[in-house]
Image: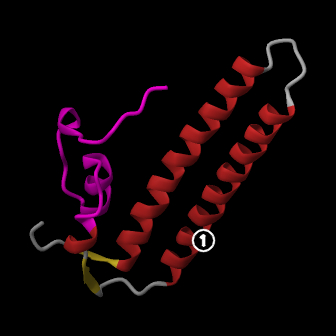
Amino acid sequence: MSSVKSTWPGILHSLEKELTSIERMARQVDLALASTFIEGRKPTNEQRAVFQEMDILIQTVEDIRNFAARLSEQMPDGQSVEIGYALEALRLDRVVSSFSQVKHDKKTDHGQVTLF
């Protein structure tokens, strides 16, 4: 990837934004799982464990998001950081766009979707 620069507040703001999106998706999955697995019947121990793991996932993402938000408030604005190499590790164009501020057509998003 070519040279891409950003500031620490910008990087952390993008991280916060992505974590907010992950948190929202996890909450939707949690609700979908709950309605699928518990339609009028008592959940199994395995289902309870899945719900507990999902709750921990949501809380962890929320904590990391809050940490990034607070950290970005304390970072001096203006020091730019080369992030091109780090962006090469990302697969989703949407995430690359979020961190690099380079806009991509949503139709070109590359990633792997696993259907069960």
Against 61, residue 72 (above or below) is below
Mark 1: few/some/many CA within 10 Å (<14, 14-19, 20+): few
Against 5, residue 48 (above or below) is above
Q: Is residue 49 left or right of residue 106?
A: right
Front residue of 60/103: it is 60
Front residue of 34/94: it is 34
Q: Position of residue 70 (x, y in %)?
A: 58, 74
Q: Position of residue 48 (x, y in %)?
A: 82, 36
**Part of the protein shown in magenta:** 87-116
Q: Is residue 44 left or right of residue 101?
A: right
Residue placed at 41% from the left, 87% from the top?
Answer: 76
Q: Which residue is the extreme one toward the right? A: 42
Q: Main secondary structure of the magenta part?
A: loop
Please identify the quarter of the rendering in which residue 49 is found: top right
Q: Position of residue 15 (x, y in %)?
A: 44, 63
Q: Which residue is mark 1?
A: 67
Residue placed at 25% from the left, 65% from the top?
Answer: 87
Amino acid type of the residue that numbered disc 1 sits on in the rendered structure: Phe
Residue placed at 30% from the left, 58% from the top?
Answer: 90
Q: Which residue is the extreme one toward the top? A: 40
Q: State the scheme by which the image is colored.
A: secondary structure
Q: Is residue 66 left or right of residue 22?
A: right
- Asked whether residue 92 is drawn in magenta, I would say yes
Q: Quadrant of the N terminus?
A: bottom left
Please identify the quarter of the rendering in which residue 13 is found: bottom left
Against 53, residue 12 (above or below) is below
Residue placed at 59% from the left, 41% from the top?
Answer: 26
- Asked whether residue 82 is drawn in magenta, I would say no
Q: Secondary structure at mark 1?
A: helix
